[in-house]
């Protein structure tokens, strides 16, 4: 047994990304013994994220620190297929993060509240008793196989979640509900360091878009997500991204590249006896943007508090743990479903309609133009979605 860890914890969290660390922090704050297992050498690597986040989204979870902020974002520029562009402000400020430093800060906060973090610890299975009940976690650390007993496992192990499969939770997605992505971190180019850019079009990014998140005036994350059902042999996300780079940034240098899948449909099946899934493992991302940092932290808070309550009451059944998805549904469920509907409308638009959308929105005074007005214009021919936009609380959640 590793000298720094015990043989039993109330809760084992698998994955030290934002959702995992926040889960651990709130469980520990509520009196539980918590172990976080992180398979890499430190939280925050590899970076599989555009690193953008809203100010209001992260403020409830951690004090803003310039050490993990690369740049401040005040607006976005949308580019239509015909080359027109449209600037959008009035949606609140945001940041492009240094995820390695940010994730480490969240993990350190969890540790400061009493959780234990073990890195280079790769979970390989869940342990079960003769009744099939989950009793702990098996993981590999420094070439040693270690078994840890626990009452609850929180799976924060990403979109490819092994924890969900081991627990028998169906986390499968159709190809149309997962985007395949590629991103470059680019140097030696000029960027508008307070604006994010988004490029749309069937020829540019079928079923998705290309993004530019500036980290400074000379460095940015430039990536693409395309619909999983839109990929063809030889024409995956990197094919389209390279065409874009050759056109707009031919003299830049690429110092980092990542691939990954992003779920675009929120799951509703992420709890079982003894097990909770959070973040990308539970498909808790914004269906339009693919961003999941804030959603993951919200889920982490709910999951950590619910797990701690179950421990206190000595009842770790699904019936008790369902308080977590119920809280998620109350706060974000309607928002996620609305965003998914908007995503389908927006991404299915032919290029001509996208061009017309940008042209129409350019007629709106810039001091009045925001996501609400953009969405209203997008769905103006759909009275049902218009009613949802007008009457639900979704608008207040658009910064998530």
Image (cartoon, helix red, strand yellow):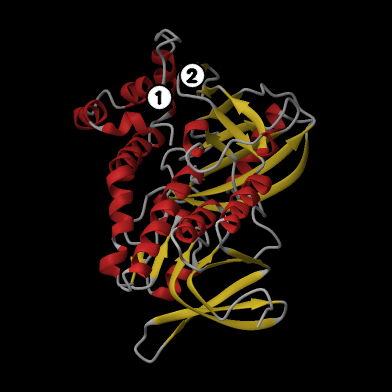
In the image, residue 364 sits, relative to residue 299, either above or below, namely above
Q: Is residue 212 visible?
A: yes
> Mark 1 = which residue?
371
In the image, residue 22 sits, relative to residue 356, either above or below, namely below
The x, y position of residue 116, in whole percent, is 60, 65
Residue 174 is left or right of residue 296, and the answer is: left
The x, y position of residue 217, in whole percent, is 73, 25
> Mark 2 = which residue?
88
> Closer to the camera, 258 or 16?
16
Q: CA distance from mark 2 to mark 1?
A: 8 Å
Residue 22 is left or right of residue 342, and the answer is: right
The x, y position of residue 64, in whole percent, is 59, 35
Which picture quadrant has residue 220? Answer: top right
Q: Residue at x 40, y 18 (%)?
A: 356
Q: Are marks 2 and 1 in contact (CB under 8 Å)?
A: yes
Q: Secondary structure at mark 2?
A: strand
> Closer to the camera, 234 or 367?
367
Mark 2: give few (<14), some (14-19) or many (20+) Cα within 10 Å: many
């Amino acid at each position: 047994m590793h000298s720094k860890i015990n043989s039993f914890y109330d809760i084992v969290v698998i994955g030290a990304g934002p959702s995992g660390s926040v889960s651990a922090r709130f469980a520990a704050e509520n009196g539980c013994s918590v172990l976080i297992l992180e398979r890499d050498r430190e939280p925050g690597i590899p970076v599989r994220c555009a690193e953008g986040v809203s100010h209001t989204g992260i403020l409830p979870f951690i004090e803003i620190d310039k050490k993990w902020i690369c740049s401040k974002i005040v607006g976005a520029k949308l580019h239509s297929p015909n080359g027109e562009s449209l600037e959008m402000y009035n949606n609140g400020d945001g940041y492009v993060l240094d995820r390695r430093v940010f994730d480490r800060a969240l993990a350190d906060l969890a540790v400061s509240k009493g959780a234990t973090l073990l890195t280079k610890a790769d979970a390989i299975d869940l342990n079960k008793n003769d009744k099939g009940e989950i009793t702990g976690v098996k993981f590999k650390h420094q070439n040693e196989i270690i078994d840890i007993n626990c009452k609850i496992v929180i799976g924060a192990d990403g979109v490819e979640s092994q924890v969900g499969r081991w627990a028998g939770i169906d986390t499968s997605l159709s190809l149309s509900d997962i985007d395949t992505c590629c991103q470059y971190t680019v140097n030696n180019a000029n960027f508008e360091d307070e604006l994010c850019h988004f490029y749309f079009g069937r020829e540019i990014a079928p079923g998705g878009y290309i993004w530019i998140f500036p980290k400074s005036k000379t460095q940015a994350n430039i990536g693409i997500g395309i619909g999983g059902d839109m990929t063809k042999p030889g024409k995956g996300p990197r094919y389209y991204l390279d065409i874009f780079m050759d056109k707009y940034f031919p003299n830049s240098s690429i110092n980092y590249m990542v691939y990954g899948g992003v779920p675009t449909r929120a799951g509703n099946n992420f709890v079982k006896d003894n097990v909770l899934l959070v973040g990308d493992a539970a498909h808790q991302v914004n269906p339009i943007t693919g961003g999941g940092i804030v959603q993951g932290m919200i889920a982490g808070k709910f999951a950590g508090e619910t797990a701690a309550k179950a421990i206190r009451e000595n009842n770790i059944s699904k019936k008790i743990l369902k308080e977590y998805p119920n809280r998620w549904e109350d706060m974000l469920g309607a928002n996620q479903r609305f965003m998914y509907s908007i995503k389908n409308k927006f991404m299915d638009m032919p290029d001509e309609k996208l061009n017309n959308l940008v042209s129409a929105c350019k007629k709106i005074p810039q001091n009045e133009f925001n996501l609400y007005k953009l969405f209203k214009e997008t769905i103006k021919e759909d009275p049902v979605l218009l009613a949802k936009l007008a009457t639900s609380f979704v608008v207040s959640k658009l910064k998530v």
